Image: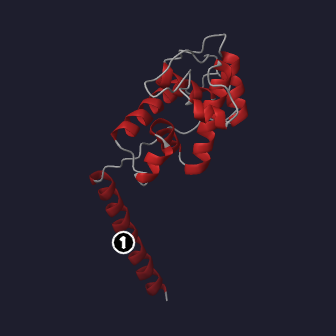
Amino acid sequence: MRSRLLILLAVAGIACTIAVAAGARGSRTSTSLVPHLPALPAKGLSSSNLCPIPAKLRPAFVRAADDTGFQLSMLVAVAQVESRLQPNAVSSMDARGLLQVMPATGASLNLNVDKPALNVLAGARYLRLLLDRYARTDLALAAYNVGPTAVDKAGGVLGPVGMHYVLDVENRWSALAGCS
């Protein structure tokens, strides 16, 4: 009986070793198109560093973060990438404001994207809708940038434009982690 148990344990150990080695080898050779976003810091952590938001815009970002459950640092990272925190920014596609929200998107949310406080709220709510839809931060951010139709057509695989955008937001978000 004991010898059978030892043989079973040895076989199980060998199988686990082979599976781990195969998994490690596979992860080294394959290139993933999905970036790894940093883990979210625990909610309620206090930090002495302030997020780099102009004082007059801080209430808008705080309200949007509270309304959507996003970290302030994430919303600030998106705004930095989208508009460099310029309230009057307008893209060539007519996306407007701090979070570069399309007027039609703002209208669908009953928010005026030309008012900075409402622009931040509209962008945060739209990003929340995308996160609820895709259940992955990287895909939600990519859809925010290139549109959900493009993400759907690509089957959730990020193209170079979406990948660059997601990595840019990820890097800024990571640098701002814990800011309040």
Find residue 166 and report its horizontal and vertical position in percent: 44, 36
**Can residue 157 be spotted in the picture?**
yes
What residue is drawn where x is 51% and y is 17%?
89
What residue is drawn where x is 53% and y is 15%?
86
Q: Which of 64/177 is in front? A: 64
Apparent side of residue 93 relative to residue 108 in the rendered image (left or right): left
Find residue 98 and report its horizontal and vertical position in percent: 56, 21
Find residue 162 and report its horizontal and vertical position in percent: 40, 39
The residue carrying pointer 1 sits among few (fewer than 14), some (14 to 19) or many (20 or more) residues within 10 Å by Cα, namely few
| Residue 114 falls in image quadrant | top right
Residue 169 higher or lower than 153, as above or below = above
Mark 1: amino acid: Ile
Residue 175 higher or lower than 20, as above or below = above
Find residue 175 and report its horizontal and vertical position in percent: 49, 25
Q: Which of 162/106 is in front? A: 106
Q: How is the image coloured?
A: secondary structure
**Can residue 37 be spotted in the picture?**
no
What residue is drawn where x is 67% and y is 30%?
65
Q: Which quadrant holds the C terminus?
A: top right
| Residue 119 falls in image quadrant | top right
Residue 31 higher or lower than 3, as above or below = above
Q: Which of 4/128 is in front? A: 128
Q: Which residue is mark 1?
A: 14
For numbered disc 1, what is the local secondary structure? Answer: helix
Residue farthest toward the left in the current orientation of the protein: 29
Residue 70 higher or lower than 86, as above or below = below
